[in-house]
Image (spheres, rainbow, N blue to C red):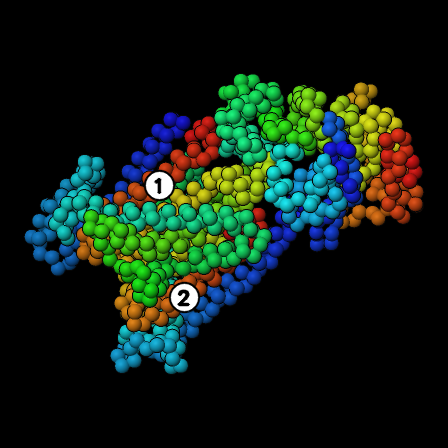
Amino acid sequence: MLAQFTNKLIGFVLTMLAAAVLVFVVLEVLPGDPALVMLGPDAQPDTLAALREQLGLNQPVVFRFLSWIAGMLWGDFGISYAYNVPVLGLVADRLAVTLPLALMAILITVVLALGLGVFAAANSQRLRGQLVMAFTQFGIAIPSFWFGLLLILLFAIHLGWFPAGGFPEWSKDPIASLHALVLPACALALVQAAILTRVTRSALLEVLHEDFVRTARAKGLTRREVLWRHALQNALVPIATVMGLQFASLVAGTIVIENVFALPGLGRLIFLAVEQRDLVVVRVIVVLLVGMVILMNYLVDIAYLFIDPRLRTRRA
Amino acid sequence: MIGAQTGRFAKIRYRLGASWLSLWLGGFITLCLFATAILSYFWTPHSVARMNMRARLQAPSLDHLLGTDHFGRDILSLLMIGSQSALKIGIVAVAIGLVLGVLLGLAATARGGWFEELAMRASDLLFAFPVVLLAIMLAATFGPGSVTSMIAIGVHNIPIFARLTRGGAKSILAREFVMASRVAGRSSSYIAALHVLPNVLNILVVQATISFAIAILADAALGYLGLGTQPPTPTWGRMLKDAQSFLSQSPYLAIFPGLAIAFTVLGLNLFGDALRDLLDPRSSQGR
Amino acid sequence: MALLEVEHLTVSLPTSDGWVHPVDDVSFTVSRGEILSIVGESGCGKSTTALAVMRLLAENVRIAGQIRLDGADLLQLSEAEMCALRGNRISMIFQEPMTALNPVKTIGFQIMEPLLVHTSMSRTEAREKAIDLLARVGIDQPARRINAYPHQLSGGQRQRIVIAMALACEPDLIVADEPTTALDTTVQRQILDLLLRLVSETSIALMLITHNLAVVSEVADRVMVMYGGRITETGPTSDVLAHPIHPYTKGLIGALPRADLPPGERLVPIAGVVPRLVDMPSGCALADRCPAVIDACRRARPAERMIRPAHQAACIRA
């Protein structure tokens, strides 16, 4: 099992490196002169020259890339051009919003999807099971940011139960901060849960045809016990796979939803950075977010080993 | 067991029945969408080119069936015109993903070896970039716009098509008739084009429908963020962005564009899922 | 009173061509310490009979008649009451040991499960008992093997695990559906010996379903031959095998591999195939395949008649 861990770790590092190269190429090499992009076509030649110097653009490309990577490994993420502060601090502040938001959304998604998925599988021949499936069709079709708007309309404007946007700092009032994340997390979770519910159901239905399910019933377990204790873990491999893939769309959703609810997270920051042409910040956040997605997929890979003992003995 | 088996057959038959229903329903919605887009080139209930500040933010009425926006423009007309860019971007994005993805998938299987490994790793890597991030990177360097949106969504579509093509190609290349043509001295790319493409067409068509739906969702999000098609061209996503400022005064502004997106996507998804069930009943239960 | 009394058991299932009856008016009994073997070709209704006794058939299937365990009709029980019986007083052994176990749970978990569900044992006690059971079904180093996963065991060992699970709560009745069919010949032998030993040690009643008459002749006290969902012949094993009455039984016996024939040359019992459930003949189910058929066979369904003591057959020509 240790060998499999190391193999996967090497794969993770290589993928991260490749992702960094891709980001670097798109944001640093393709535009030709990043300084020109950041300052716009009307920039003075001496300002341009100064920025080039500051960004180290006079160095060869490979050197720039390597020093960028080396810097990030040492915790030096560069200086934001628009804010003129270290990017690391900026990002760390915003992560305190984005990370809890994403975790909350994942939690809601998993609880909702497993519950509904098991329910739909247990009742696949009945109307109530079919109704759940019909609802998931709608869930998949609704854009998360529109669902966010609808939630604001109902729960913030009409009922006044939740704030329509904004975010009080954690240090001031943690409860209020958490409260402000509920609607955005729900908006994010809906689509994800709809997809995951479908996956859970079909994976379970597949498993329910297996012989061991009948064995478990012959032992005297009820249908419900068989579903949760025996079927679910067997269905978990496809469910985990989809969860890993969904994480990318969750990250994308976070960017959009933070803008809907005016939450000062990474998504909001990167969006503003694009408007301000702050390539330094854009670059770091893109790598960070993509890194999270890749990390998640490797965690899922490792999770397989815990879900299915048969995979532990197989050579990677 | 006998009981379970007949139960399963009954279910397949039942599901195929339901599939035909989704096929017609989804097809109908999709057709309406295309019809609306084409119609809007010639006629809309009101002109949206001029602002009319006296008629701004009106609730739905007989004159303006879905009300007016903050510039006094007719919402229904805007939605109709908005369908143009939704379809355009969807089609171009799927075309980019389809063409490049299929080429990549075919090339990977035909060449094999390190090239295949590299191509598939690269397409896996693209999977890790959410559409919005791709669009943000492009917008940061080249500026926002419909082209940014098309390219971002299109590139994001490459991996899935590459993967499907390669998967189908792998199983077909192993079959006898392909072996025969290999023995007959045909080149790999000839075999790929002649034998593989017709055989994976089903899967590709189904995926194209689903990707089309996803593209429309993604474009709406980009439009909402202001990274996609720029004003004055009306888009559904942009309309929702504008509506957010008037959420408490004119909530219907935020309702109708969202419904337009949701129904379009629902129609395409129903159509795609039904197509998949009917073309390949074994690939069962939803996604 | 026999332990299990099945009376007029009919299993009906809906198809697009109307209701069909995979099991049609079947009555039999099994006593404590007795091995009753149900024999027939595949599709004759023997597995369905077994699953009907367990009440594990699909939900859309209808079961009529009576299945009495110690006098109490199982068909009248609620699903919850039935769950309390399954794995406790009646347990089942399946044909495919390779797929009958949950691949992601340890065998210890799976053997302990019926104990934890049906008894008030603690986890530690259940674990002790599971180790005992493993030893009893002939697994080496049971204390170590209890943490193994099914894929780490051979087919024969897995079948032993399934048997251990079935034995866990010391049931009154075990229903074994082709327990040796999927195994190698030598392993078959061992598993049969194990079952025989367990039945003689305790007073378990065993319902042994098989298509293999050789197995029947070695272990069964009584044999019940089924065809087309109906009973064709019942009686003491030695009597039925030595003096078969029904043409179908004769056919089955004639198809047994014999020393005077080259190995592997297995005869088809009787020419023709089992009729499909939807076009089951109204008279004798065997009519279309029977060498001794007469017109009267097609007219009415033959009743079971006592031909010799304790030996019944459903054939008008007997």
- For the residues labelled 1 and 2, the Cα–Cα distance comes to 33 Å
What residue did someone put label 2 on? Answer: B259
Q: Is residue B77 above or below residue B100?
A: below
Nearer-the-camera pick, A182 or A302: A182
Residue located 14% across and 55% down the image: A39
Kind of residue at badge 1: Met
Counting from the top left corner in percent of width and height, residue B69 is at 31, 73
Q: Identify the element where label 1 is drawn.
A: helix
Nearer-the-camera pick, C155 or B127: C155
- Mark 2: give few (<14), some (14-19) or many (20+) Cα within 10 Å: some
Residue located 37% across and 60% down the image: A147
Nearer-the-camera pick, C41 or C67: C67
Label 1 marks a residue whose chain is: A
- Lateral position of residue A316 relative to residue A212, left or right: left
What residue did someone put label 1 on? Answer: A296
How many marks the image carries: the answer is: 2
